Amino acid sequence: DWNMPDYVAEAVANIRAQVGTDEVILGLSGGVDSSVAAALIHKAIGDQLTCVFVDHGLLRLNEGEQVMKTLGDHFGMKIVHIDATDQFMGKLAGVADPEAKRKIIGREFVEVFQAEAGKLSNARWLAQGTIYPDVIESAGAKTGKAVAIKSHHNVGGLPETLNLKLLEPLRELFKDEVRKLGVALGLPPAMVYRHPFPGPGLGVRILGEVKKEYADLLRRADAIFIEELRKTEDPISGKNWYDLTAQAFAVFLPVKSVGVMGDGRTYDYVVALRAVQTTDFMTADWAELPYALLKKVSGRIINEVRGINRVTYDVSSKPPATIEWE
Ligand code: XMP
């Protein structure tokens, strides 16, 4: 375990010694690891760092704005923000298979990032938020999904094609240490202690074919669920349900069911809520959320998100179900 202020000072000195006056580029995903890596490198070399933030249109509600506000406005980092929603949606049109969707999203991500990185002709380094468990995972056996995780997160192949050297200042840290480092660097705790979010984002939380219309509905339903989890405290532990769950999110089901609203009949989409408790994400229990909380969330989603008229709660544990639905 590290003493954080000492660790920061040492890491900053190392980064400065390593890169000298060179320029560095970093792919920002909105996730914890790349944000903390960016904050650390920015502290060390300031404007020699340029971040490229590729928005695939599959982020959570207001996530892009939050990244730009926190890292751009507040920290003053140089960030190139690319809204590539149309490009991603175009490539995903007609594709229903989960692994095919992952591959497309990963490949497009690399392509968009590469095109931007190519414009920054002075860059000599590619920075990545690789953490110690990623290093272990790469060395050991991999499942299909693990490979997809790696190739997406670490923008595989880029150093070779762009002729860049790799800068990975979080390589020795575990996740909880990365979070402590983030807080020590001044990142908002709510950002640093967020639930994990998969690289392909909402792309694997919209079952089957991804459409912008679906993503827009899902984002709003998901935000309501998260807001109510954060607001609802468990009287026994004194903690809120967001902190009592390891991952919680909404899943979009592209099937329609019948409902009533006022005098009329509706025929709209379904959303499933998923909340799990786990420490290692290899096994997970579905969370026994209070009925009152589920009632509040379903009522709000159905009333506030026109286009969704039914909400279900997923009571499947892992194994045999996975945490994500795809
Ligand atoms: P499953 O669904 O396999 O998920 O139980 C275990 C953990 O991995 C995350 N996950 C992903 N993360 N890219 C990622 O970066 C992916 O393609 C991916 N698929 C699953 C999932 O959110 C959970 O934390």
Image (cartoon, rainbow, N blue to C red):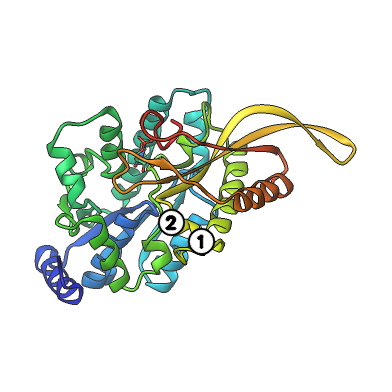
Q: Mark 2: give few (<14), some (14-19) or many (20+) Cα within 10 Å.
A: many
- Is 262 positioned to the left or the right of 105 in the image? right
Residue at image x 56%, y 48%? 222
Q: Quadrant of the N terminus?
A: bottom left
For the residue marked with disc 1, what is the amino acid?
Answer: Asp
Q: Mark 1: give few (<14), some (14-19) or many (20+) Cα within 10 Å.
A: few
Residue 87 higher or lower than 123, as above or below:
above
Q: Nearer the viewer, residue 33 or 294?
A: 294
Residue 219 higher or lower than 317, as above or below:
below
Residue mark closest to the camera, 2 vs 1: 1
For the residue marked with disc 2, what is the amino acid?
Answer: Leu
Mark number for residue 273? none
Q: Quadrant of ligand 1?
A: top left
Q: Nearer the viewer, residue 62 or 226?
A: 226
- Kindly indicate whether the residue at mark 1 contacts the one at mark 2 (C-beta within 8 angstroms): yes
Which picture quadrant has residue 151? top left
For the image, the number of numbered tags is 2
Residue at image x 43%, y 52%? 245
SS category of the residue bearing label 1: loop
Residue furthest out toward the right: 263
SS category of the residue bearing label 2: helix
Return the residue at label 1: 234
Q: Position of residue 90 (x, y in %)?
A: 51, 31
Q: Position of residue 97 (x, y in %)?
A: 44, 23
Q: Nearer the viewer, residue 322 or 171?
A: 322
Return the residue at label 2: 244
- Is 141 positioned to the left or the right of 272 in the image? left
Q: CA distance from mark 2 to mark 1?
A: 9 Å
Q: Position of residue 214 (x, y in %)?
A: 60, 37
Does label 2 or label 1 sit earlier along the sequence?
1
Q: Position of residue 87 (x, y in %)?
A: 48, 37
